[in-house]
């Protein structure tokens, strides 16, 4: 892949509750069905997107932070530039909110490194569960 944004451990992917988004991207990039287990999904995810930080997951480690991206940005006093649900505006808000959250609650980006590669709602149980039921088509 020649874009340089996947398969590149120098790129940091900052997201908000994006398990389905990465599932879709992996399906497109590999031209295959998603892996059947969570463990295999995360193995493939780490290859294509080695540095993922999910803000929704990071919020679990911060007192009194909950809700969606807009609410979190308001609480952290991060200004939105542009209209909601437009890619550029949402991306900028996500990146700015991540930086502010890391600074205020994790002593900077270095403080969130131990939470790298976890997507909110997936991969937090400590064991692999089937993601796909192959008995039904």
Image: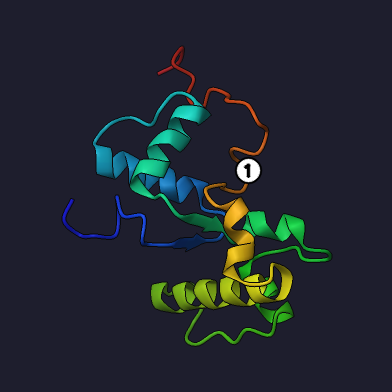
The coloring applied to the image is rainbow
| x and y percentages locating residue 45 in the rendered image | 41, 42
Depicted 48 relative to depicted 64: above or below: above
| x and y percentages locating residue 15 in the rendered image | 51, 60
Residue at x 59%, y 65% (from the top left corner): 110
Q: Nearer the viewer, residue 71 or 39?
A: 39
Q: Residue furthest right?
A: 64
Circle 1 packing at 10 Å, graded few (<14), some (14-19), many (20+), is few
Depicted 26 relative to depicted 58: above or below: above
Q: Viewed as shown, does residue 58 lie left or right of 29? A: right
Depicted 108 relative to depicted 66: above or below: below
Q: Residue furthest top?
A: 135
Q: Nearer the viewer, residue 66 or 11?
A: 11
Residue at x 47%, y 37% (from the top left corner): 42
All told, the count of numbered labels is: 1
Residue at x 56%, y 47% (from the top left corner): 119
Q: Which residue is mark 1?
A: 121
Q: Viewed as shown, does residue 35 lie left or right of 77? A: left
């Amino acid at each position: 892949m020649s874009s340089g944004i996947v398969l590149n451990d120098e790129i940091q992917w900052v997201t908000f509750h994006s398990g389905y988004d990465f599932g879709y991207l992996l399906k497109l990039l590999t031209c295959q069905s998603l892996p059947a287990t969570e463990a295999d999904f995360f193995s493939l995810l780490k290859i294509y997107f080695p540095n993922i930080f999910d803000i929704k997951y990071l919020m679990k480690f911060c007192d009194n932070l909950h809700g969606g991206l807009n609410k979190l940005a308001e609480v952290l006093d991060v200004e939105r530039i542009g209209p909601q649900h437009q890619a550029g505006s949402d991306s900028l808000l996500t990146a700015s909110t991540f930086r502010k959250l890391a600074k205020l609650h994790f002593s900077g980006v270095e403080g969130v490194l131990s939470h790298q590669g976890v997507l909110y709602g997936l991969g937090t149980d400590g064991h692999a569960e089937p993601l796909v039921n192959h008995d039904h088509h």
